[in-house]
Image (cartoon, rainbow, N blue to C red):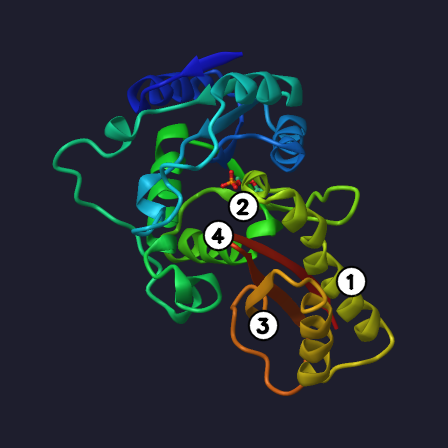
Amino acid sequence: MKIINTPKELSAYAKAQKDAGKSIGLVPTMGYLHDGHASLIKKSASENDVTIVSVFVNPTQFGAGEDLDSYPRDIEHDCTAAEAAGANVVFHPEPGDMYPAGYGTYVSVDSDMTKVLCGRSRPTHFRGVTTVVAKLFNISAADRAYFGQKDAQQLAVIMRMVSDLNMGIEIIPCPIVREPDGLAMSSRNTYLSPGERTQAPVLSRSLSAAKKLIDAGERDVKTLRDEISRIISCAPDADAEYIEFRSFPSLDECGGRISGKVLIALAVRFGKTRLIDNIIVNI
Ligand code: AMP
């Protein structure tokens, strides 16, 4: 497996692959890889001749006072994990190579979908995400890019960008990988204290309970939200930031009753750690 550190070198590598008729899959990550990331890399490796995994803690998607400096990093582990999952390249650029002096271009999905859910507490986040992802698409010349449903709003926003800007890349959504107790895998889970970690499965537990009610015929948003809220409040340190019901991928708010493809999305704080989780149901 190759490790490439500059956009210029990755562009040259990608061009050589394309010239040789190879298909390219891209898995954008911020590193500290876990089995959720590995599932994306494995899927890409099974569907493309070449898989590029980017490992880049992207400064433009962090707001002031967020965890840019403390975000966990371990590039040696990431290279081992990426290679084991089938990656051909790890792309690990410096911030100064992605955003050199004079940098001034941003890609921004200018619609409510970036202002709701996580966009409410992170107003500049999605602009940073779409900017870096657009850059990675250009640098890697990928045919397909793999994103986890774990970040369902991010997935919806990227699908919007790709459609709006006629980017010739296929977006492949991938299911959420969970710990044995249901907690969605996340690099940020390492922030949880042991006590918070034992409480954190309330997110997935509350979503499973909502799914059970829906399977039994419940459609009322208030009833479903109350049940989710009740289960989350069983965890003494949990502070729910939002519990929302939105159509997927448009992210329009559901009225009183759910129908069609519905995203049930949560953000819950445990002390300084903010966890997100979701399910998508089809009614
Ligand atoms: P991150 O490194 O957190 O920016 O995530 C990189 C990619 O991995 C994104 O597309 C995420 O949605 C995806 N991802 C993160 N956690 C999981 C998980 N538990 N299951 C599936 N995909 C995930």
Q: Secondary structure at mark 2?
A: strand
Q: Secondary structure at mark 4?
A: loop
Q: Nearer the viewer, mark 3 or mark 2?
A: 3
Quarter of the picture holding the C terminus: bottom right
Q: Which residue is mark 1?
A: 208
Q: Which residue is mark 4?
A: 272
Q: Secondary structure at mark 1?
A: helix
The picture places residue 45, in percent across and down from the top left corner, at 63, 26
Which amino acid, by three-letter code, is at mark 3? Answer: Glu
Q: Look at 65% across and 18% down and name the residue there.
A: 84
Q: CA distance from mark 3 to mark 2?
A: 24 Å
> Of callouts 1 and 4, which one flags the residue occurring earlier in the amino acid sequence?
1
Q: Nearer the viewer, mark 2 or mark 1?
A: 1
Q: Height in image: 95 above or below 20?
A: below
Quarter of the picture holding the N terminus: top right
Cβ of mark 4 under 8 Å from ligand 1: the answer is no
Cβ of mark 3 under 8 Å from ligand 1: the answer is no
Q: Which residue is mark 3?
A: 244
CB under 8 Å between discs 2 and 1? no
Q: Is residue 44 visible?
A: yes
Q: Which residue is mark 2?
A: 171
CB under 8 Å between discs 4 and 3? no
Toward the bottom, the furthest residue is 256
Q: CA distance from mark 1 to mark 4?
A: 25 Å
Which amino acid, by three-letter code, is at mark 4? Answer: Lys
Q: Nearer the viewer, mark 1 or mark 4?
A: 4
54 relative position to 33: left or right: left
CB under 8 Å between discs 1 and 3? no
52 relative position to 244: left or right: left
The picture places residue 76, in percent across and down from the top left corner, at 51, 16
Which amino acid, by three-letter code, is at mark 1? Answer: Ser
